[in-house]
Structures are given as structure tokens and as C-alpha cells.
Image (cartoon, rainbow, N blue to C red):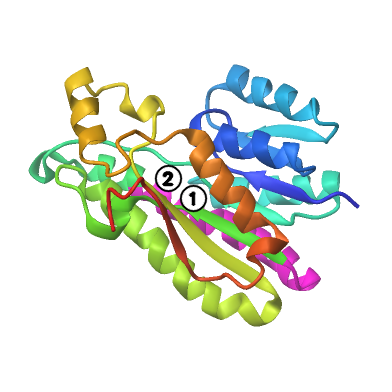
Amino acid sequence: MAKSALITGGSRGIGAAIAVSLAKEGYDIAVTYKERSDSAENVIQQARQFGVKATAFKADVKSFARAHEIADAAIKEFGQIDVLVNNAGIASSSLFTDLSFDEWNEIIGTNLTGCYNFCHAVLPHMIRRHSGSIINISSMWGQVGASCEVAYSASKAGIIGLTKALAKEVGLSGIRVNAIAPGVISTEMLDEYTKDDLNALKDDTPLNRLGTPQDIADAAVFLSGEKSSFITGQIIGVNGGFVI
């Protein structure tokens, strides 16, 4: 039976790169998307070029019930879920004093609660099989914090805590849980930045370039497979040296 992976927020950016890269490695894939059905369909078509099964589910990851529905549907279609990638996330930049309660809840709900929802949905299946890899996408700002991104930093720090604690809890069940903490990655999240802003971020990165979605996808493929079989509870920084 082919291995399979479920990737939240898999219609574009980092999630899309991870989905296509796993498909290239022979994984059947399921991706979730919130609004961009056209982008999700494009990812599905790219994945199918590698001869794997691929499907997309519309979802707001903040919904506990929807997470369970999607996990059940993916297991029914593929027979199992070997890899869960919690990638869905949003960001917002503002002074903390201007951050509304609704904005706080939206960011925490999407980034952190969404991660909880899908872990909760998939883990019973992985525990029964005594096998699985969970990869949570955090951020370097979850490690060190970012001014004017308090909610985002808090949500991503929460993912780091969740990852470490869950790894300890499910290790004896044969399940590995790790996180990737990306640095500055060229995705739509950077669209609001000016060219000067981006050049400054590049200058602050020791490797003197911005990251790409593929940089994160390569790390996710590694954490999915047997070459990382003795790695769990780790936060893998893919940031070009921005945070050391």
C-alpha cells in the first residue's frame, strides 16, 4: 500500500510545495484549502503527474468537527495516513495595542487550534497502526518573537510547545512529532513588504537570500521518511541563519 500524507493549507506557498514534493516521493496526498479552490486543484493536478492519488478538501482548520471529517475521508480513500503536515496559517502585523480580540482569536484559532484539531483527528489512527510522522510548521518568530507580530509569534510558539510535549506522549506509540521553523520565505505573506524591506531581510540573513517554499518542503520530506526515524520532538530551523 502506498504511503499517504495530509497537508493543511496545501493549496499554495509552503503547503503546496510540500504536497507536490511528497507526491514526487510516491505519497498519495490530501490537501486542505479555505478559499482558493483553483489553487488547490492546480496542486492536485501537479501531484497526479507522479502517478499518485490526490484530493482536496475545503476546510476552515479552526473547525474541530471538519478536521475529523477530513481525516476520516482521507483514511477511507487512502487506507491510512502516514504523515500529517500542519501547515495552515495566517499572519498579521500591527502594534499589540491595536490588535483586536477578534484578530487575536483568528490567528490563534487558525495557527494553533488548527494544529490541535488535525492532530486530534489523525492521532487515534496513527496510534492504532503504531506508526506515523506529524510535522508542524512553526516559525522562527515562534522561537524568538517578532515586534508587531505578537499574536503570530504566540501561536507559533504554542506550536513548538505542542510539538515537544506531544512527541514525549506518543513516542512509545511509534509516532514522531517534529516542527519546522521557517525563516523569511518568499510566499504571498511577503506581498505587503517593500523591495527595501525584503532587501533588509536578505541582508539580515547570513546566507544572504530569502528562503523558498521548496527549502521547507525538502525538510518536510526528510522528516516524513525513514532517514529521520530517530528524530522526534525537534524544532528544525530552516532560516538561512537568521536565528541561530
The amino acid sitting under disc 1 is Gly
Q: Where on the picture, by quarter, is residue 199?
A: top left
Q: Nearer the viewer, residue 226 or 12?
A: 226
Which residue reaches farthest left?
97
Q: Amino acid at mark 2?
A: Thr
Residue 225 seen in this snapshot: yes
Magenta segment, prevailing SS (helix, strand or loop): helix
In contact (CB < 8 Å): disc 2 and disc 1: yes
**Number of the label disc, if any, that sits on residue 127:** none
From the viewer's perspective, is 63 left or right of 89?
right
User: Which one is nearer the viewer's eye here, 148 or 37?
Assistant: 148
Q: Residue at x 50, y 43 (%)?
A: 216
- In the picture as drawn, the residue positioned furthest to the bottom comes out as 172
Q: Is residue 10 visible?
A: no
The part of the image, by quadrant, that contains residue 172 is bottom right
Task: Give the labeled residue for mark 1.
Answer: 114
**Residue 83 sits in quarter:** bottom right
> Outermost residue, front direction?
207
> Badge 1 local density, few (<14 within 10 Å), some, or many (20+)?
many
| Residue 196 part of the magenta-drawn span | no
- The image shows residue 82 at horizontal and vertical percentages of 74, 57
Element assignment for label 2 = helix
- Kindly identify the residue that appears in the image at 54 percent across and 73 percent down: 167
Label 2, residues with CA under 10 Å away: few <14, some 14-19, many ≥20: many
Q: Tell me what residue is drawn at x 77 percent, y 48 percent.
A: 4
**Left/right of residue 49 with respect to residue 240 in the rendered view:** right
Q: CA distance from mark 2 to mark 1?
A: 5 Å
What residue is disc 2 on? 110
Q: Quadrant of the C terminus?
A: bottom left
Q: Which residues are magenta?
A: 108-131
* Residue drawn 35% across the image and 33% down it: 210
